[in-house]
Amino acid sequence: MSCNQENQKGKELNVDNSQEEIIPQVVSHKIETKSGMIFTLTEEKITNSVSNISIQGMNFPNSNELLTFEGVDPIEQFYVLDLNKDGYEELYIAARSVGSGSYVNLIGIASFTDESYGEIYVQSIAENDDLAQGYMGHEEVTFSDSNIELTYPIYKENDTNSRPTGGERIVNYELITGEAGYILNPYLQI
């Protein structure tokens, strides 16, 4: 991967973290929204399983803050979409843990009417009793122009980590307005 890879508008970029690489390594991506806002996403791979991620917006008249996430999982993919359909696209990052469960953690950055930007609070599956039942990772995340979908196997009480027997669950996300900003809320697809 080159140091500056550009993500075409509205296109998903998968990041290949499967190959042995020289560590530490820094990889940067320049991501442009449909309205011309730019996010510079930088991942400093400390080890094969730990990264530091920083995001800085450009063209936002009231903000140029550097948002940092230290000691997080490596980036697997990222996508720009307008989940709440307010006319301003958000940046979503899927970071995957290394190990037997290989859990996906989502990071979201919202545009506040293209004037400024900030972190989206992401509710985890574990925070929702209905969704957490039988959840042990191994999920796949899919981004589209209008949706974020998480699919994962359901584990029954005596299942081993490698043999789930409870079928699968599909969870969608909605972006809702909270008291202090946006919340990425998981809900069961019906």
Image (cartoon, helix red, strand yellow):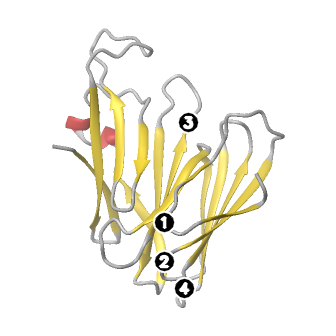
Which residue is the site of mark 1? Answer: 10
- Of the numbered discs 1 and 3, the one sitting upstream in the chain is 1
Name which residue type carries label 1. Answer: Gly
Q: Secondary structure at mark 2?
A: loop
Which residue is the site of mark 3? Answer: 97
Q: Is residue 181 left or right of residue 54?
A: left
Which residue: 54% across, 82% down?
36
Name which residue type carries label 2. Answer: Lys
Q: CA distance from mark 4 to mark 3?
A: 32 Å
Q: Which mark is residue 34?
A: 2
- The residue nearer to you, when weighing 90 against 49, is 90
Which residue: 48% across, 77% down?
34
Which residue is the site of mark 4? Answer: 60
Callout 1–callout 4 Cβ contact below 8 Å? no
Local crowd size for mark 1, using a 10 Å CA cut-off: few (<14), some (14–19), many (≥20): some
Callout 4–callout 2 Cβ contact below 8 Å? no
Local crowd size for mark 2, using a 10 Å CA cut-off: few (<14), some (14–19), many (≥20): some
Which residue: 27% across, 13% down?
157
Q: Is residue 163 left or right of residue 66?
A: left
- Of the numbered discs 4 and 2, the one sitting upstream in the chain is 2
Q: Is residue 43 left or right of residue 107?
A: right
- The residue nearer to you, when weighing 164 against 182, is 164
Which residue: 73% across, 38% down?
47
Q: CA distance from mark 4 to mark 2?
A: 14 Å
- Of the numbered discs 4 and 3, the one sitting upstream in the chain is 4
- Where does the image place residue 11, in percent across and percent down from the top left? 52, 61
Q: Is residue 15 left or right of residue 174?
A: right
Q: Secondary structure at mark 4?
A: loop
